[in-house]
Image (cartoon, rainbow, N blue to C red):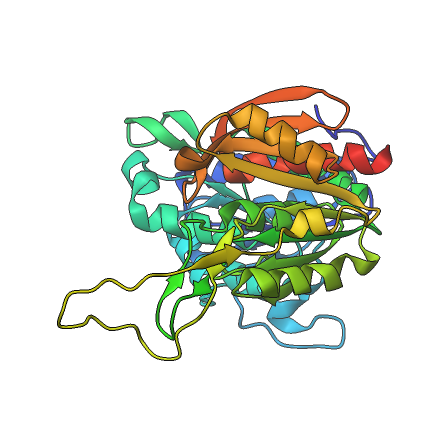
Protein backbone atom coordinates (compact mmCIF):
# COMPACT_ATOMS: atom_id res chain seq x y z
CA UNK A 1 0.00 0.00 0.00
CA UNK A 2 1.45 3.38 -1.05
CA UNK A 3 2.74 5.28 1.96
CA UNK A 4 1.68 2.67 4.53
CA UNK A 5 3.73 1.77 7.57
CA UNK A 6 4.40 3.39 10.93
CA UNK A 7 6.36 6.30 9.47
CA UNK A 8 4.12 7.02 6.45
CA UNK A 9 2.36 9.98 8.07
CA UNK A 10 4.30 10.06 11.32
CA UNK A 11 3.79 13.31 13.20
CA UNK A 12 1.38 14.76 10.62
CA UNK A 13 -1.94 16.41 11.49
CA UNK A 14 -4.84 15.37 9.25
CA UNK A 15 -8.28 16.98 9.47
CA UNK A 16 -10.96 14.58 8.20
CA UNK A 17 -14.33 16.09 7.33
CA UNK A 18 -17.19 13.58 7.01
CA UNK A 19 -20.46 14.62 5.35
CA UNK A 20 -23.98 13.24 5.03
CA UNK A 21 -23.66 10.43 2.50
CA UNK A 22 -24.43 6.74 2.77
CA UNK A 23 -20.73 6.26 1.96
CA UNK A 24 -19.75 7.87 5.29
CA UNK A 25 -19.28 4.45 6.91
CA UNK A 26 -16.40 3.71 4.52
CA UNK A 27 -14.37 6.63 5.88
CA UNK A 28 -13.84 4.79 9.17
CA UNK A 29 -11.22 2.75 7.33
CA UNK A 30 -9.46 5.92 6.12
CA UNK A 31 -9.25 7.19 9.70
CA UNK A 32 -7.79 3.84 10.77
CA UNK A 33 -5.20 3.86 7.98
CA UNK A 34 -4.06 7.38 8.85
CA UNK A 35 -3.78 6.63 12.57
CA UNK A 36 -1.88 3.41 11.89
CA UNK A 37 0.55 5.36 9.70
CA UNK A 38 1.33 7.68 12.61
CA UNK A 39 -0.92 10.66 11.91
CA UNK A 40 -2.96 12.63 14.41
CA UNK A 41 -6.49 12.66 13.00
CA UNK A 42 -9.13 15.24 13.92
CA UNK A 43 -12.55 14.18 12.65
CA UNK A 44 -15.23 16.76 11.89
CA UNK A 45 -18.78 15.71 11.06
CA UNK A 46 -21.79 17.47 9.61
CA UNK A 47 -25.18 16.82 11.20
CA UNK A 48 -26.06 14.69 8.19
CA UNK A 49 -22.96 12.53 8.71
CA UNK A 50 -23.99 11.74 12.28
CA UNK A 51 -27.22 10.22 10.92
CA UNK A 52 -25.21 7.58 9.04
CA UNK A 53 -22.44 6.85 11.56
CA UNK A 54 -21.87 7.88 15.17
CA UNK A 55 -19.08 10.19 16.33
CA UNK A 56 -18.18 7.55 18.93
CA UNK A 57 -16.87 5.25 16.19
CA UNK A 58 -14.35 7.85 15.02
CA UNK A 59 -13.49 8.91 18.57
CA UNK A 60 -12.66 5.31 19.46
CA UNK A 61 -10.40 4.88 16.44
CA UNK A 62 -8.58 8.21 16.68
CA UNK A 63 -8.53 8.50 20.50
CA UNK A 64 -9.51 12.14 20.03
CA UNK A 65 -12.66 14.18 20.35
CA UNK A 66 -14.90 14.44 17.30
CA UNK A 67 -16.10 17.89 16.27
CA UNK A 68 -19.77 18.15 15.27
CA UNK A 69 -20.76 21.75 15.95
CA UNK A 70 -19.08 25.14 15.57
CA UNK A 71 -20.75 26.31 18.76
CA UNK A 72 -17.91 25.28 21.02
CA UNK A 73 -16.59 27.36 23.94
CA UNK A 74 -13.19 28.97 23.47
CA UNK A 75 -10.38 28.23 25.88
CA UNK A 76 -6.65 28.73 26.04
CA UNK A 77 -6.16 25.15 24.86
CA UNK A 78 -8.82 25.07 22.12
CA UNK A 79 -9.62 28.09 19.97
CA UNK A 80 -13.20 27.03 19.30
CA UNK A 81 -14.14 26.16 15.74
CA UNK A 82 -10.88 27.35 14.14
CA UNK A 83 -8.59 25.07 16.17
CA UNK A 84 -8.72 22.07 13.83
CA UNK A 85 -8.22 24.09 10.67
CA UNK A 86 -5.22 25.91 12.08
CA UNK A 87 -3.29 22.81 13.11
CA UNK A 88 -4.18 20.67 10.06
CA UNK A 89 -1.40 19.94 7.55
CA UNK A 90 -3.88 18.26 5.22
CA UNK A 91 -7.65 18.83 5.15
CA UNK A 92 -9.60 15.88 3.72
CA UNK A 93 -13.34 15.82 3.02
CA UNK A 94 -14.74 12.33 2.38
CA UNK A 95 -17.33 11.70 1.22
CA UNK A 96 -17.70 15.15 -0.35
CA UNK A 97 -21.38 15.52 -1.23
CA UNK A 98 -22.73 17.88 -3.89
CA UNK A 99 -23.90 20.15 -1.08
CA UNK A 100 -20.45 20.27 0.52
CA UNK A 101 -18.72 20.93 -2.81
CA UNK A 102 -21.06 23.88 -3.36
CA UNK A 103 -20.40 25.25 0.12
CA UNK A 104 -16.63 24.99 -0.23
CA UNK A 105 -16.68 26.52 -3.72
CA UNK A 106 -18.73 29.51 -2.58
CA UNK A 107 -17.16 30.01 0.86
CA UNK A 108 -20.20 29.11 2.98
CA UNK A 109 -19.64 28.34 6.64
CA UNK A 110 -22.72 26.90 8.30
CA UNK A 111 -21.35 23.61 9.62
CA UNK A 112 -18.17 22.40 11.31
CA UNK A 113 -16.61 20.93 8.17
CA UNK A 114 -16.85 23.86 5.76
CA UNK A 115 -16.24 26.39 8.55
CA UNK A 116 -13.01 24.67 9.57
CA UNK A 117 -11.95 24.30 5.93
CA UNK A 118 -12.33 28.05 5.48
CA UNK A 119 -10.17 28.63 8.54
CA UNK A 120 -7.40 26.35 7.26
CA UNK A 121 -4.46 27.05 4.96
CA UNK A 122 -3.72 23.33 4.59
CA UNK A 123 -3.95 21.57 1.20
CA UNK A 124 -7.53 20.46 0.54
CA UNK A 125 -8.27 16.90 -0.65
CA UNK A 126 -11.84 16.13 -1.74
CA UNK A 127 -13.33 12.70 -2.45
CA UNK A 128 -16.74 13.26 -4.08
CA UNK A 129 -19.59 10.76 -3.74
CA UNK A 130 -23.12 11.21 -5.06
CA UNK A 131 -25.68 10.12 -7.63
CA UNK A 132 -24.48 9.78 -11.23
CA UNK A 133 -26.70 12.56 -12.55
CA UNK A 134 -25.81 14.85 -9.65
CA UNK A 135 -22.11 14.43 -10.41
CA UNK A 136 -22.65 15.27 -14.08
CA UNK A 137 -24.83 18.32 -13.36
CA UNK A 138 -23.19 21.51 -14.73
CA UNK A 139 -23.48 23.25 -11.35
CA UNK A 140 -21.52 20.48 -9.62
CA UNK A 141 -18.91 20.41 -12.39
CA UNK A 142 -18.47 24.19 -12.17
CA UNK A 143 -17.99 23.95 -8.40
CA UNK A 144 -15.40 21.19 -8.87
CA UNK A 145 -13.58 23.29 -11.48
CA UNK A 146 -13.55 26.26 -9.10
CA UNK A 147 -12.11 24.16 -6.29
CA UNK A 148 -9.47 22.62 -8.57
CA UNK A 149 -8.43 26.07 -9.77
CA UNK A 150 -7.88 27.09 -6.14
CA UNK A 151 -5.58 24.14 -5.61
CA UNK A 152 -7.89 21.48 -4.19
CA UNK A 153 -7.02 17.90 -5.12
CA UNK A 154 -10.11 16.02 -6.36
CA UNK A 155 -9.87 12.23 -5.93
CA UNK A 156 -12.59 10.38 -7.84
CA UNK A 157 -15.38 9.63 -8.02
CA UNK A 158 -15.29 6.15 -9.53
CA UNK A 159 -17.85 4.44 -11.74
CA UNK A 160 -19.74 1.46 -10.34
CA UNK A 161 -22.84 0.39 -8.42
CA UNK A 162 -24.35 3.22 -6.38
CA UNK A 163 -26.52 3.09 -3.26
CA UNK A 164 -29.58 3.98 -5.35
CA UNK A 165 -29.15 0.76 -7.35
CA UNK A 166 -28.01 2.74 -10.38
CA UNK A 167 -24.66 1.98 -11.99
CA UNK A 168 -22.68 5.04 -13.01
CA UNK A 169 -20.14 7.68 -12.01
CA UNK A 170 -20.35 8.87 -8.43
CA UNK A 171 -18.95 6.10 -6.26
CA UNK A 172 -16.54 7.01 -3.46
CA UNK A 173 -13.00 5.86 -4.29
CA UNK A 174 -11.50 3.01 -2.23
CA UNK A 175 -10.05 4.23 1.04
CA UNK A 176 -6.67 2.64 0.28
CA UNK A 177 -6.42 4.82 -2.84
CA UNK A 178 -7.45 7.95 -0.95
CA UNK A 179 -4.93 7.16 1.78
CA UNK A 180 -2.25 6.76 -0.89
CA UNK A 181 -3.12 10.21 -2.28
CA UNK A 182 -2.80 11.74 1.19
CA UNK A 183 0.52 10.02 1.94
CA UNK A 184 1.81 10.87 -1.54
CA UNK A 185 0.83 14.49 -1.09
CA UNK A 186 3.00 14.81 2.01
CA UNK A 187 5.94 13.29 0.13
CA UNK A 188 5.36 15.46 -2.93
CA UNK A 189 5.20 18.67 -0.93
CA UNK A 190 8.82 18.15 0.06
CA UNK A 191 10.03 17.72 -3.52
CA UNK A 192 9.98 21.44 -4.37
CA UNK A 193 10.54 22.81 -0.88
CA UNK A 194 12.92 25.77 -1.09
CA UNK A 195 12.38 26.17 -4.85
CA UNK A 196 10.96 29.30 -6.46
CA UNK A 197 8.83 28.68 -9.53
CA UNK A 198 7.33 31.29 -11.87
CA UNK A 199 4.24 30.27 -13.86
CA UNK A 200 2.51 32.35 -16.51
CA UNK A 201 -1.12 31.71 -17.43
CA UNK A 202 -4.07 32.93 -19.46
CA UNK A 203 -4.16 35.02 -22.58
CA UNK A 204 -3.19 38.63 -23.13
CA UNK A 205 -5.34 41.48 -24.44
CA UNK A 206 -3.90 44.00 -26.87
CA UNK A 207 -6.08 47.15 -27.02
CA UNK A 208 -7.49 48.39 -30.32
CA UNK A 209 -9.32 51.28 -28.71
CA UNK A 210 -10.65 51.99 -25.18
CA UNK A 211 -13.28 49.20 -25.42
CA UNK A 212 -11.92 46.60 -27.89
CA UNK A 213 -8.89 44.33 -27.90
CA UNK A 214 -7.18 41.51 -29.77
CA UNK A 215 -7.14 38.35 -27.67
CA UNK A 216 -7.53 34.59 -27.73
CA UNK A 217 -9.65 31.85 -26.17
CA UNK A 218 -7.23 30.84 -23.40
CA UNK A 219 -9.06 30.01 -20.15
CA UNK A 220 -5.93 29.95 -17.98
CA UNK A 221 -6.85 26.48 -16.61
CA UNK A 222 -3.53 24.90 -17.58
CA UNK A 223 -1.34 27.54 -15.95
CA UNK A 224 -3.48 27.76 -12.82
CA UNK A 225 -3.38 23.97 -12.46
CA UNK A 226 0.42 23.99 -12.83
CA UNK A 227 0.73 26.71 -10.19
CA UNK A 228 -1.54 24.77 -7.81
CA UNK A 229 0.43 21.55 -8.35
CA UNK A 230 3.74 23.33 -7.68
CA UNK A 231 2.41 24.90 -4.46
CA UNK A 232 1.15 21.49 -3.31
CA UNK A 233 4.70 20.18 -3.61
CA UNK A 234 6.18 22.94 -1.48
CA UNK A 235 7.36 25.48 -4.05
CA UNK A 236 7.13 29.24 -3.61
CA UNK A 237 5.11 30.12 -6.72
CA UNK A 238 4.61 33.41 -8.51
CA UNK A 239 1.67 33.25 -10.92
CA UNK A 240 1.68 35.93 -13.62
CA UNK A 241 -1.77 35.84 -15.19
CA UNK A 242 -3.69 37.50 -17.95
CA UNK A 243 -7.45 38.02 -17.53
CA UNK A 244 -9.33 34.81 -16.63
CA UNK A 245 -12.50 33.81 -14.81
CA UNK A 246 -10.48 31.70 -12.34
CA UNK A 247 -9.63 32.38 -8.72
CA UNK A 248 -5.87 32.26 -8.03
CA UNK A 249 -4.75 29.03 -6.33
CA UNK A 250 -4.24 29.33 -2.59
CA UNK A 251 -0.63 30.02 -1.67
CA UNK A 252 0.65 31.71 -4.84
CA UNK A 253 2.03 35.22 -5.20
CA UNK A 254 -0.42 36.54 -7.78
CA UNK A 255 0.44 39.15 -10.41
CA UNK A 256 -2.37 40.21 -12.73
CA UNK A 257 -1.47 41.69 -16.12
CA UNK A 258 -3.32 42.41 -19.34
CA UNK A 259 -0.95 42.98 -22.25
CA UNK A 260 2.07 41.09 -23.58
CA UNK A 261 4.33 43.98 -22.59
CA UNK A 262 3.00 43.87 -19.03
CA UNK A 263 3.53 40.10 -18.90
CA UNK A 264 7.10 40.49 -20.13
CA UNK A 265 7.90 43.08 -17.46
CA UNK A 266 6.25 41.07 -14.66
CA UNK A 267 7.93 37.83 -15.73
CA UNK A 268 11.37 39.47 -15.92
CA UNK A 269 10.94 40.76 -12.37
CA UNK A 270 9.74 37.41 -11.08
CA UNK A 271 12.52 35.24 -12.55
CA UNK A 272 15.34 37.23 -10.94
CA UNK A 273 15.56 34.83 -7.98
CA UNK A 274 13.64 31.88 -9.46
CA UNK A 275 14.74 28.30 -10.10
CA UNK A 276 12.33 27.63 -12.96
CA UNK A 277 9.84 29.26 -15.31
CA UNK A 278 6.82 27.47 -16.78
CA UNK A 279 5.52 29.65 -19.60
CA UNK A 280 2.00 28.36 -20.23
CA UNK A 281 0.41 31.74 -21.05
CA UNK A 282 -1.06 32.24 -24.52
CA UNK A 283 0.72 35.50 -25.25
CA UNK A 284 -0.44 37.50 -28.26
CA UNK A 285 2.11 37.45 -31.11
CA UNK A 286 0.84 40.75 -32.54
CA UNK A 287 -0.73 43.97 -31.27
CA UNK A 288 -2.16 47.08 -32.97
CA UNK A 289 0.65 49.43 -33.87
CA UNK A 290 -1.53 52.37 -32.84
CA UNK A 291 -4.25 52.34 -30.21
CA UNK A 292 -7.18 54.61 -31.07
CA UNK A 293 -7.84 57.27 -28.47
CA UNK A 294 -11.60 56.88 -28.90
CA UNK A 295 -13.93 54.03 -29.79
CA UNK A 296 -13.64 53.18 -33.48
CA UNK A 297 -17.05 53.84 -35.00
CA UNK A 298 -18.79 52.85 -38.20
CA UNK A 299 -18.89 55.58 -40.82
CA UNK A 300 -21.81 56.45 -43.14
CA UNK A 301 -19.83 55.43 -46.24
CA UNK A 302 -19.33 51.90 -44.85
CA UNK A 303 -15.54 52.13 -44.90
CA UNK A 304 -13.64 49.54 -42.85
CA UNK A 305 -10.73 50.91 -40.85
CA UNK A 306 -7.30 49.46 -41.55
CA UNK A 307 -5.55 48.07 -38.49
CA UNK A 308 -1.76 47.85 -38.70
CA UNK A 309 -0.17 45.21 -36.46
CA UNK A 310 3.30 44.95 -34.94
CA UNK A 311 5.11 42.16 -33.12
CA UNK A 312 4.84 41.79 -29.37
CA UNK A 313 7.93 40.86 -27.35
CA UNK A 314 8.88 37.15 -27.41
CA UNK A 315 9.15 36.66 -23.67
CA UNK A 316 10.90 33.28 -23.63
CA UNK A 317 13.36 34.24 -26.36
CA UNK A 318 14.20 37.37 -24.39
CA UNK A 319 15.01 35.23 -21.35
CA UNK A 320 17.25 32.80 -23.25
CA UNK A 321 20.36 33.86 -21.32
CA UNK A 322 18.67 33.69 -17.90
CA UNK A 323 20.15 30.58 -16.28
CA UNK A 324 17.08 28.84 -14.90
CA UNK A 325 15.08 25.80 -16.01
CA UNK A 326 12.57 26.97 -18.60
CA UNK A 327 9.52 25.03 -19.78
CA UNK A 328 7.51 26.35 -22.70
CA UNK A 329 4.31 25.49 -24.55
CA UNK A 330 3.68 25.15 -28.26
CA UNK A 331 0.01 25.38 -29.19
CA UNK A 332 -0.09 24.83 -32.93
CA UNK A 333 -2.68 24.25 -35.66
CA UNK A 334 -0.27 22.51 -38.05
CA UNK A 335 3.14 20.79 -38.09
CA UNK A 336 2.90 20.43 -34.32
CA UNK A 337 6.10 18.57 -33.49
CA UNK A 338 8.24 20.35 -36.08
CA UNK A 339 7.17 23.78 -34.79
CA UNK A 340 7.63 22.65 -31.18
CA UNK A 341 11.19 21.45 -31.83
CA UNK A 342 12.07 24.76 -33.47
CA UNK A 343 10.76 26.69 -30.44
CA UNK A 344 12.54 24.34 -28.04
CA UNK A 345 15.90 25.06 -29.66
CA UNK A 346 15.39 28.73 -30.51
CA UNK A 347 14.32 29.68 -26.98
CA UNK A 348 16.81 27.59 -25.02
CA UNK A 349 14.20 25.49 -23.24
CA UNK A 350 14.74 22.37 -21.17
CA UNK A 351 11.31 21.07 -22.16
CA UNK A 352 8.34 22.09 -24.28
CA UNK A 353 4.73 20.91 -24.08
CA UNK A 354 3.24 20.60 -27.56
CA UNK A 355 -0.50 20.41 -28.10
CA UNK A 356 -3.17 21.07 -30.70
CA UNK A 357 -4.28 24.68 -30.30
CA UNK A 358 -7.82 24.17 -31.57
CA UNK A 359 -8.52 21.16 -29.32
CA UNK A 360 -6.76 22.51 -26.24
CA UNK A 361 -7.21 26.27 -25.84
CA UNK A 362 -10.23 26.92 -23.63
CA UNK A 363 -10.95 23.18 -23.14
CA UNK A 364 -11.03 21.22 -19.87
CA UNK A 365 -8.93 18.34 -21.19
CA UNK A 366 -5.74 18.17 -23.21
CA UNK A 367 -3.50 15.82 -25.11
CA UNK A 368 0.17 16.70 -25.17
CA UNK A 369 3.63 15.67 -26.26
CA UNK A 370 6.64 16.48 -24.10
CA UNK A 371 9.83 17.28 -26.01
CA UNK A 372 13.19 17.67 -24.25
CA UNK A 373 16.42 19.46 -25.07
CA UNK A 374 18.25 16.10 -25.14
CA UNK A 375 16.00 14.88 -27.98
CA UNK A 376 13.62 12.71 -25.97
CA UNK A 377 9.89 12.74 -26.76
CA UNK A 378 6.99 11.61 -24.53
CA UNK A 379 3.43 11.19 -25.80
CA UNK A 380 0.73 11.84 -23.22
CA UNK A 381 -2.85 10.49 -23.47
CA UNK A 382 -5.85 12.78 -23.27
CA UNK A 383 -6.45 13.83 -19.67
CA UNK A 384 -7.82 16.65 -17.55
CA UNK A 385 -5.56 19.68 -17.47
CA UNK A 386 -5.16 19.25 -13.71
CA UNK A 387 -3.78 15.73 -14.29
CA UNK A 388 -1.51 17.01 -17.06
CA UNK A 389 -0.25 19.70 -14.67
CA UNK A 390 0.85 16.97 -12.24
CA UNK A 391 2.75 15.25 -15.08
CA UNK A 392 4.47 18.52 -16.01
CA UNK A 393 5.50 19.16 -12.40
CA UNK A 394 6.80 15.57 -12.17
CA UNK A 395 9.11 16.32 -15.12
CA UNK A 396 10.08 19.70 -13.68
CA UNK A 397 11.14 18.05 -10.42
CA UNK A 398 13.42 15.72 -12.42
CA UNK A 399 14.86 18.60 -14.47
CA UNK A 400 15.62 20.60 -11.32
CA UNK A 401 17.38 17.62 -9.72
CA UNK A 402 19.50 17.19 -12.86
The residue that appears at 73% across and 42% down in the rendered structure is: 326
Report if residue 288 is visible in the image: yes
Viewer-nearest residue: 335 or 75: 335
Left or right for 275, reference 46:
right
Rendered image quadrant of residue 273: bottom right
- Residue 347: % across, % down: 70, 40
- Residue 319: % across, % down: 74, 50
Viewer-nearest residue: 265 or 208: 208
Left or right for 266, reference 366:
right
The quadrant the N terminus occupies is: top right
Residue 84 versus residue 12 in the image, above or below: below
Counting the numbered discs, the total is 0
Rendered image quadrant of residue 189: top right
The residue that appears at 82% across and 33% down in the rendered structure is: 6
Q: Residue furthest left?
A: 300
Left or right for 198, reference 114:
right
Report if residue 85 is visible in the image: no
Rendered image quadrant of residue 34: top right
Amino acid sequence: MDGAGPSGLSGKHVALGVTGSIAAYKVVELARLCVTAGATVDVLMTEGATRFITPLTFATLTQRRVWTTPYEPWSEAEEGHIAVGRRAECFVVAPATADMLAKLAHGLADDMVCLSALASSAPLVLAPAMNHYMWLHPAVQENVATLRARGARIVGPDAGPLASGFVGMGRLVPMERLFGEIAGMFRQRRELAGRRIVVTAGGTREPLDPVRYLGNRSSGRMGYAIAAAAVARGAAVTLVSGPTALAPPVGVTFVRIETAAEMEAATRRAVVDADALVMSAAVADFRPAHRAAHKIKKTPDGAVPEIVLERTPDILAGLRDVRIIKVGFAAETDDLLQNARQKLAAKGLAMIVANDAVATIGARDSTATFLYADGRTEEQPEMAKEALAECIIDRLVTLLKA
